[in-house]
Image (spheres, grey):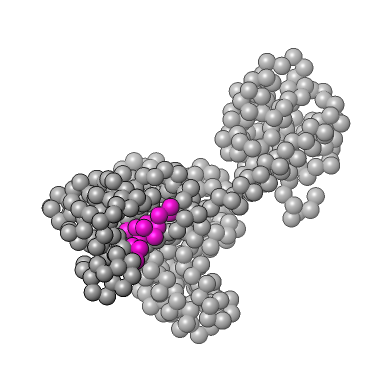
Amino acid sequence: MSPEKAPSLLIVEDDLALQKQIKWSLDRFDSATAHDRESAMLQLRKHAPAVITMDLGLPPDADSVSEGFRLLQQILNFDPDIKVIVLTGQNDQTNALRAVGMGAYDFFAKPFATELLNLTIERALRLYELQKENRRLQTMHQPDVLAGLMTRDSEMLRICRTIEKVASSNATVMLLGESGTGKELLARGLHQASPRRAGRFVAINCAAIPENLLESELFGFERGAFTGAAKTTLGKIETASGGTLMLDEIGDLPFSLQAKLLRFLQERTIERVGGRQEIPVDVRIVCATHQDLNALSKSGRFREDLYYRLAEIVIHIPPLRERVGDAALLAHAFVRRFAQEHKRATMTLSEEAIQALECHPWPGNIRELENCIKRATIMADGSQISCSDVGLSTSTFDAVDHSLDLRLIREHAEKRAVVTALGRVNGNIVKAADLLGVSRPTLYDLMYRLCLK
């Protein structure tokens, strides 16, 4: 078997002589072997085979089927599309049917007909590939919310899943987060994942436009509505009809316009400035701000009724300093991008530079990091970006964890170490394992246990 080619078949059998015999009889397939549940899961995570043949009687109690059913459940939880063929004894049809009921592809009684088992595995492989191709074709027509967003942080991944869930609805979404955390990127992802993706995505910054112009920018104006209004002009709301409108920095919306926006959200109609006709508009609203709108509404600086209209679904975006491993991960991506843009040779970050990037609190978040790496790629003399090139100190900012639960502390520390290592080496499993001082299978096992894979 070629070392570059991953096995498409995994044979799980505790009897080593029988295991060897089965592998020999299935020699037309690239196969790996395992003798118990633990080694089977290790091979599964390592090679991701399309088909698995397995005996239900596995150590430590080979006379019982409990370990076999436990393994079957783990396999199907790991990847429901894997085709599992259960090999049972002649008088064990009850357990075989139970396995099929749980999701196994087929079962064979021992001793089995080699030609028939070969044919069944071949069909299972073909079905697996067809399903895989079908998912690929579906993905081509379904936008990925994560496109353009790079993260390994569990909270950011949870936010992306939330965006995907709410995309199909018409609910108004409020994105809360510091400046530079990627609010517009998530808003665009929400639009692209929604049924409105064929329509326009229109964004307007409520803090960047003077109050006397913002109303006409939002609602449009009729010809002759004011001096200089030479023709009827559509506003941002009307322009985004059939699509999505993002109201950025909604907390800075003038109080005088908040009542008019509230009326639009209630009636879904607008009146242009200088007009008298009500115009129906079908648009999805996504708003974003770095301010605490709830506090603003309680203090009377933001209409409470408007706040509740906008806050149908509220998503808090964590700052970069709270995203474990993301600073290094994004830095690697920015280095590649800016090195290409500035016609530089392949560039890398030094270990000291990575440590400095990880320690910095990033008050400007991703925007600050992007500018920092852009400057570093220009200023670096050679192909490696040093700590002085990024212009940051290596002082640390350690957070104090007052939890006394040793199990939780250990799990948190392991997860942070694994994510940080993966970020430093740009996702290279071999290098991450070396950095952590563990074997590659151990790292795969840690990633599986910590839900990082």
Above-or-below relation of 380 to 322: below
Q: Give the range drawn in magenta.
A: 233-247
Residue 48: percent from left, percent from top: 66, 44
Residue 127 placement: quadrant: top right
Q: In this view, does 204 lie to the left or right of 37?
A: left
Q: Say whether residue 235 is magenta.
A: yes
Residue 234 placement: quadrant: bottom left
Residue 98 placement: quadrant: top right
Residue 148: percent from left, percent from top: 49, 61
Q: Residue furthest bottom?
A: 381
Residue 453: percent from left, percent from top: 54, 47
Residue 21: percent from left, percent from top: 83, 33
Above-or-below relation of 453 to 344: above
Whether residue 181 appears in this view of the structure is no
Above-or-below relation of 173 to 351: above
Q: Say whether residue 10 is magenta.
A: no
Name the residue rendered at 69%, 35% in the picture: 83
Name the residue rendered at 45%, 44% in the picture: 168
Q: Is residue 422 left or right of residue 277?
A: right
Name the residue rendered at 58%, 60% in the picture: 428
Name the residue rendered at 20%, 61% in the picture: 254
Of 223 and 381, the residue lying toward us: 223
Q: In this view, does 50 lie to the left or right of 338?
A: right
Of 307 and 56, the residue lying toward us: 307
Q: Is residue 373 left or right of residue 298?
A: right
